[in-house]
Image (cartoon, rainbow, N blue to C red):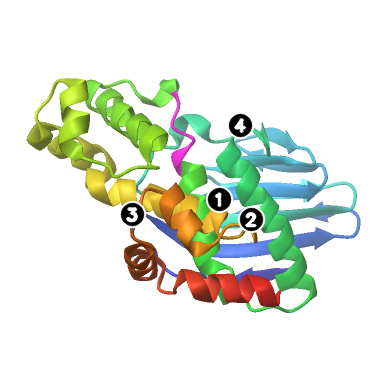
């Protein structure tokens, strides 16, 4: 077993990342922690025990353990699973916790788990530094966690309005996002819309739009056939230079350095 700490992001904090391999029967210690824990099973099944109940997580499934829940993990056969401890201010995960899902439930999680499979091989078997994956993992986690927003968690009008804004951004991120255009379409003033969105999400509409564009861009850049100029246009930037500047400000490294790293790997 290996455990690695991560960096802190504005919207998401990774508390730990680890990979567990068990030869035969495994009985973990009962424990709890002050953050969510995403568990993804590469080889299973495994069993999560909590509150005198058990939850079976099969191979290819994932589950989120709520914060402060006393639990332990057991396995009666050889297993392999990744666990990611995180905190987020993007979405209320209450309704999504302790429900096993297939890895392809959403596109965002499908991309995330594809990257996790590659990361497990390179970090835990080939000794590649985890820091290599941290920015990409943060970005993919943000997209995936954000995609968990469901009708079960949008009971109040402000959250409903916030989700309409997000839907607009998700469908129109390939062009410049204008708050006044969103406001006109939703029959509210830009000021009111901005206040509602910030109160629900802890960030402005423009910040969320940039975050979403950058999340899409970092995935697109991993496709060798996409140039930096191509990706800039695909996420709504007229200038590749300005795109590169925003990308470096957001992630801390340039898209060209990511492209070079991909070409060398």
Residue at mark 2: 83
For the C terminus, the image quarter is bottom right
Distance between the alpha carbons at the discs numbered 3 and 4:
42 Å
Residue range of the region highlighted in magenta in the rendering: 146-150
Which is in the foreground here, disc 2 or disc 3? 3
Crowd tier of the residue under label 1, counting other residues whose Cα lies within 10 Å: few below 14, some 14–19, many 20 or above: many
Residue at mark 1: 37
In the rendering, which numbered label is found on residue 238? 3
Q: Position of residue 235 (x, y in %)?
A: 42, 49
Disc 2 element: strand
Q: Position of residue 64 (x, y in %)?
A: 57, 42
Q: Is residue 20 left or right of residue 25?
A: left
Q: Position of residue 63 (x, y in %)?
A: 62, 40
Of the two numbered discs 2 and 3 on the same chain, state the one appearing first in sequence. Answer: 2
Of the two numbered discs 3 and 1 on the same chain, state the one appearing first in sequence. Answer: 1
Residue at mark 4: 99
Disc 1 element: strand
Eyeballing the image, is 99 above or below 20?
above
Of the two numbered discs 3 and 4 on the same chain, state the one appearing first in sequence. Answer: 4
Which of the 4 image quadrants contains residue 124?
bottom right
Residue 130 visible from this viewpoint: no
Dots 1, 4 in contact, CB < 8 A? no
């Amino acid at each position: 077993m290996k455990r690695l700490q991560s960096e802190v992001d504005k919207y998401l904090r990774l508390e730990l990342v680890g990979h567990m391999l068990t030869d035969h029967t495994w009985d973990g210690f009962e424990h709890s922690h002050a953050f969510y824990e995403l568990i993804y099973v590469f080889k299973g099944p495994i069993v999560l025990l909590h509150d005198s109940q058990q939850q079976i997580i099969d191979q290819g499934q994932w589950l989120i353990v709520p914060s402060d829940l006393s639990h332990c993990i057991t396995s009666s056969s050889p297993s392999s699973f990744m666990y990611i401890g995180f905190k987020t201010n993007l979405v209320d995960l209450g309704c999504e916790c302790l429900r096993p899902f297939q890895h392809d439930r959403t596109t965002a999680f499908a991309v995330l788990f594809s990257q996790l499979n590659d990361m497990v091989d390179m970090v835990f078997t080939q000794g590649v530094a985890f820091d290599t994956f941290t920015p990409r993992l943060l970005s993919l986690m943000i997209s995936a966690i954000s995609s968990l927003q469901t009708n079960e968690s949008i009971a109040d009008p402000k959250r409903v309005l916030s989700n309409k804004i997000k839907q607009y951004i998700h469908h129109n991120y390939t062009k410049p996002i204008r708050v006044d255009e969103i406001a006109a379409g939703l029959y509210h003033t830009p000021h009111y819309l901005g206040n509602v969105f910030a109160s629900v999400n802890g960030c402005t509409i423009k910040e969320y739009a940039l975050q979403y564009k950058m999340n899409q861009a970092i995935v697109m850049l991993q496709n060798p056939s996409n140039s930096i100029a191509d990706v800039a246009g695909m996420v709504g930037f007229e200038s590749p230079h300005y795109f590169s500047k925003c990308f470096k400000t957001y992630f801390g490294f340039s898209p060209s350095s990511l492209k070079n790293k991909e070409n060398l790997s």
